[in-house]
Amino acid sequence: MLYLYGLGIGLRSILKGRLDRENIKNLVVPVNYWRTLEFRLAHAALQITRADRVLDIGSPKLFSLYLSDRIGAEVFSTDIDEYFVKSYSAYRELKGIDERRFHVMAIDGRDLPFDEGYFTKIFSISVLEHIPDDGDATCASEIGRSLARGGICVITVPFSPTGAVEYKFPRQFYWASKVQEKINEGKVFYQRRYSEKDLYERIVGPSSLTVEKILYMGERFALSRRKELSEYFHPLLGPLHPALSYLFHSAPMPSWRGMRRPLGALLVLRKA
């Protein structure tokens, strides 16, 4: 449904004369390989209703727009960079969503400008791993502070049984200018892959939230030890990403042990 929703947004925008990168992306690959799985699991775990006030920290923005438009929740869609503000403000107008129900703003997840317990639901899809130094722990603490009692938070991050840190050239990702960690042979910090121990020490512990469940995500087989299957996908396969996800992703499991290739973790946390 989210895939079709994105296609509709892209098509309507282009018919109105807005031929830009975001609209073309919505036509070619509105929901990519990994987000297909992550958003499906997050949507099921969050159980968002119209009565919820929801915070999205840095996730791909289409999911936030969908939750506000189709479910009617009040959603705050945020990112550290303002690249998305103009396009998603236009989408809000296109869909006739009240601006009091869908907020778009550039903020830093390490310093959330909201009162304690302001949100009933929070999610962050593939974001915390990109925050350098101890910023992921700081963001987790801010999530715990901003979540209301009884509220639910869903976080996804890459996983590795032994943990790992990855570097990339700054030109390869849009938030590189926000990274403060030292350069490594021309590359800067890109992301970490969390071990099970890391999940508890860097996210669960600092958040002070209770673990409802952790699900591990992976692939059914591998062409290489070093690469994920999606790294082999040709750009023209964009429209097939949801189908490829159903074909190649293994069923989420409560333990990574015994999985053929665990690559990600989804945490469902609750504030007691």
Image (cartoon, grey):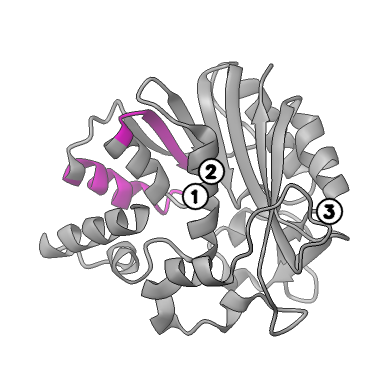
Magenta residues (range): 71-94
- In the picture, the quarter occupied by the C terminus is top right
Task: Please indicate, yes or no, whether residue 267 appears anywhere in the rendered image.
Answer: yes
Q: Where is residue 23 in the image (x, y as percent from the top left)?
A: 28, 63
Residue lying at 19% horizontally and 43% vertically, measured from the top left: 95
Residue lying at 35% horizontally and 67% vertically, measured from the top left: 25
- Judge by depth and name the residue closer to the eye, 124 or 3: 3
Marks 3,2: beta carbons within 8 A: no
Classify mark 1: residues with Cα within 10 Å, few (<14), some (14-19) or many (20+).
some
CA distance separating discs 1 and 3: 22 Å
Q: Which of marks 3 and 2 is nearer the N terminus?
A: 2
Q: What residue type is labelled 2?
A: Ala
Residue lying at 28% horizontally and 44% vertically, measured from the top left: 89
Q: Which of marks 1 and 3 is nearer the N terminus?
A: 1
Tag 2 residue: 42
Q: Which amino acid does label 1 sit on?
A: Phe
Residue 66 drawn above or below residue 233:
above
- Judge by depth and name the residue closer to the eye, 243 or 226: 243
Tag 1 residue: 39
Residue 2 drawn above or below residue 200:
below
Marks 1,2: beta carbons within 8 A: yes
- Displayed quadrant of residue 177: bottom right
Tag 3 residue: 195
